[in-house]
Amino acid sequence: MHLGKPDPRFVSSPRARRSFNLALKIALSLVSLLWVILIIDSVLGLGLARFGLRPRDFEGLVGLFTAPLLHGGFEHLFSNTLPLLVSLTTILYLYPRAAMRVIPIIWLGSGLMGWFIGRPSLHFGASGFVYGLLAYVFISGILRMDMRSVAVSVMVWFLYGSMIWGVLPIRPNMSWELHLSGAILGVALAIVFRRWDVIPVKRYAWEDDDSIPDWFPQREAPLEDTAHEVTEPAEIESRLELESRRQNDNKPRD
């Protein structure tokens, strides 16, 4: 398993900082909008919950657009605020190109799936959308295997791992159908868009085939094998003649 380290020139660039600031501003704007809607609804008693999602009721399809904006109370919205802020900022910053498609698909798709499988009651809240974003961020980090994405995945699991129980029909007053729909979409979209928004990875000199450092052991040239030389016949005769003369010269003389 190899974790790619993002190129510091990319993650520390002014453009990257501007991207993070923009992502945070967008996430803060959406969270602020949700609080404004809830406060106005509570003060004026508008009863906006009626615009939630009603499964298998064609009039309830308006909830595809409005249900994530509505909450049943301050405690309900408070529990969604931090996860929404973290997940939305992360996806907009780390995966900006994919986010332009992933965000609307999860927003509408989780509601559409919930419209088919949900219980016949009003469903509202941003939690289905949050589940989709968190699932996308977590699975994307595992699939991409770059250090930033893996770090975010670990953080998401550490902070919100217990939310996995929200996809099970444990609490009767909780819309587990929207949670499950969002999570399924998030996982599927992470697989589909796994090759999008791939950031530059720092490369080291030793990773290049044509750049081998001096300390790397070099392969020595094979020793010349002289024991099996091929010698021409004329050369053999010349050697024998020289050897014969040498022996004659070394004989004792009277």
Image (tube, rainbow, N blue to C red):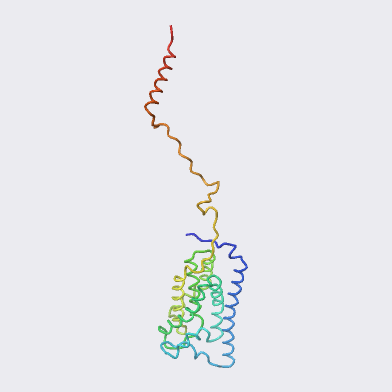
* Along the viewing direction, whichever of 106 and 74 lies nearer the viewer: 106
At 38% from the left and 23% from the top, the residue drawn is: 237
Furthest toward the right, the residue is: 14
The quarter of the picture where residue 9 lies is bottom right
At 40% from the left and 84% from the top, the residue drawn is: 116
Residue 173 vertical placement versus 11 (above, below): below
Coordinates of residue 77 in the picture (x, y in percent) = 55, 83
Furthest toward the left, the residue is: 233
Coordinates of residue 216 in the picture (x, y in percent) = 53, 47
Residue 228 vertical placement versus 55 (above, below): above
Residue 47 vertical placement versus 203 (above, below): below
* Along the viewing direction, whichever of 193 and 115 lies nearer the viewer: 193
The number of callouts visible is 0
Coordinates of residue 124 in the picture (x, y in percent) = 49, 85
At 41% from the left and 88% from the top, the residue drawn is: 56
Figure quadrant of the C terminus: top left
Residue 34 vertical placement versus 150 (above, below): below
Coordinates of residue 241 in the picture (x, y in percent) = 40, 20
Furthest toward the bottom, the residue is: 45
Furthest toward the top, the residue is: 254
At 56% from the left and 79% from the top, the residue drawn is: 81
